[in-house]
Image (tube, rainbow, N blue to C red):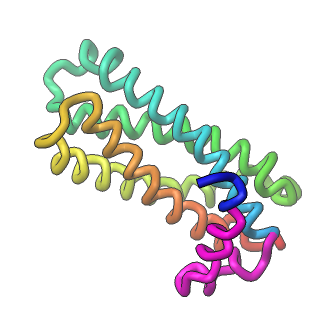
C-alpha cells in the first residue's frame, strides 16, 4: 500500500454502512477531529504502555509481592490508564476540541473522567480476558502488552463516541 492508496481506502471505509451513519462520514471536519483524537490517543497509548510495563515489572512487585499476576496487572493498568487519560484530556482540550476551552474545565473534566472510569472498567475487562486467552500461546511481557493494545483499541471507540456525544456535544 502506498500513500496514493490512502484516499481510496478512506473513501471505501466512509461508505461502509456502520461508518456512513456516523457524523464522521457526512462532515469532513469531524473526520479530522477523529484523526486528531486518535493521534492524541496514540501518544496516550505509548504513555500508557510505558507506565504499565514500569509499574507491572519494576514498581509493584517489591511493594505488593503477594499479588497474583492478574491482580498486579489490573493495579498497574489502572495507574497507567489514569495517567494516559489525564494526558489525553489535556491534549484533547487544547488541540482536538479547542472550542471546549470556553467551558469550565472542572465540569468538562468531570464528564471526561466519568466516561473514562467506565472506559477503565472496559479496558481492565478486555485486558484480563485477552491476556488469559493468549497467555497460553505467548509469554510475558508479550501477552499482556498485546492484550493491552487490544483493550486500548476497544476503548478508543467507546471514549470517542461517548465523549463526542456528551463531553463535547456542544462543539460543531
Q: Magenta segment: does it hold 140?
A: no
Q: Can you give x and y, in whole percent of width and height, for residue 68 in the image?
A: 15, 31
Say which residue appears at 29% left-offset and 38% top-offset.
Answer: 144
Count every numbered label the image shows and give the total. Answer: 0
Q: Can you give x and y, in whole percent of width and height, for residue 98 in the image?
A: 84, 54
- Please report the bounds of the magenta region as a residue range: 6-28
Image quarter where the C terminus lies is: bottom right
* Left or right: 50 in relation to 167: left
Q: Please tell me whether the stretch drawn in magenta is mainly helix, strand or loop.
A: helix
Say which residue appears at 67% left-offset and 70% top-offset.
Answer: 8
Say which residue appears at 58% left-offset and 69% top-offset.
Answer: 162
Q: Nearer the viewer, residue 104 or 10?
A: 10
Q: Can you give x and y, in whole percent of width and height, for residue 99 in the image?
A: 86, 59
Residue 107, picture quadrant: bottom right
Image quarter where the N terminus lies is: bottom right
Q: Can you give x and y, in whole percent of width and height, for residue 158 in the image?
A: 50, 65
Q: Nearer the viewer, residue 64 or 44?
A: 44
Q: Nearer the viewer, residue 22 or 95?
A: 22
Would you place residue 46 above or below residue 39 in this image?
above
* Left or right: 170 in relation to 122: right
Say which residue appears at 45% left-offset and 33% top-offset.
Answer: 49
Q: Nearer the viewer, residue 23 or 76?
A: 23
Residue 107 visible to an observer of this rendering: no
Amino acid at each position: 500500500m502506498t500513500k496514493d492508496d490512502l484516499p481510496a481506502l478512506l473513501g471505501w471505509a466512509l461508505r461502509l454502512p456502520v461508518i456512513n451513519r456516523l457524523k464522521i462520514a457526512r462532515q469532513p471536519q469531524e473526520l479530522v477531529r477523529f484523526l486528531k483524537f486518535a493521534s492524541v490517543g496514540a501518544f496516550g497509548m505509548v504513555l500508557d504502555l510505558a507506565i504499565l510495563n514500569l509499574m507491572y515489572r519494576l514498581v509493584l512487585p517489591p511493594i505488593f509481592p503477594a499479588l497474583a499476576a492478574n491482580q498486579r496487572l489490573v493495579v498497574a493498568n489502572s495507574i497507567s490508564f489514569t495517567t494516559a487519560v489525564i494526558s489525553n484530556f489535556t491534549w484533547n482540550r487544547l488541540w482536538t476540541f479547542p472550542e471546549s476551552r470556553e467551558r469550565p474545565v472542572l465540569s468538562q473534566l468531570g464528564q471526561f473522567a466519568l466516561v473514562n472510569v467506565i472506559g477503565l472498567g472496559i479496558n481492565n475487562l478486555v485486558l484480563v480476558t485477552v491476556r488469559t486467552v493468549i497467555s497460553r500461546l505467548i509469554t510475558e511481557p508479550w501477552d499482556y502488552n498485546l492484550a493491552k493494545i487490544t483493550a486500548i483499541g476497544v476503548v478508543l471507540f467507546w471514549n470517542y463516541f461517548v465523549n463526542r456525544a456528551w463531553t463535547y456535544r456542544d462543539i460543531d
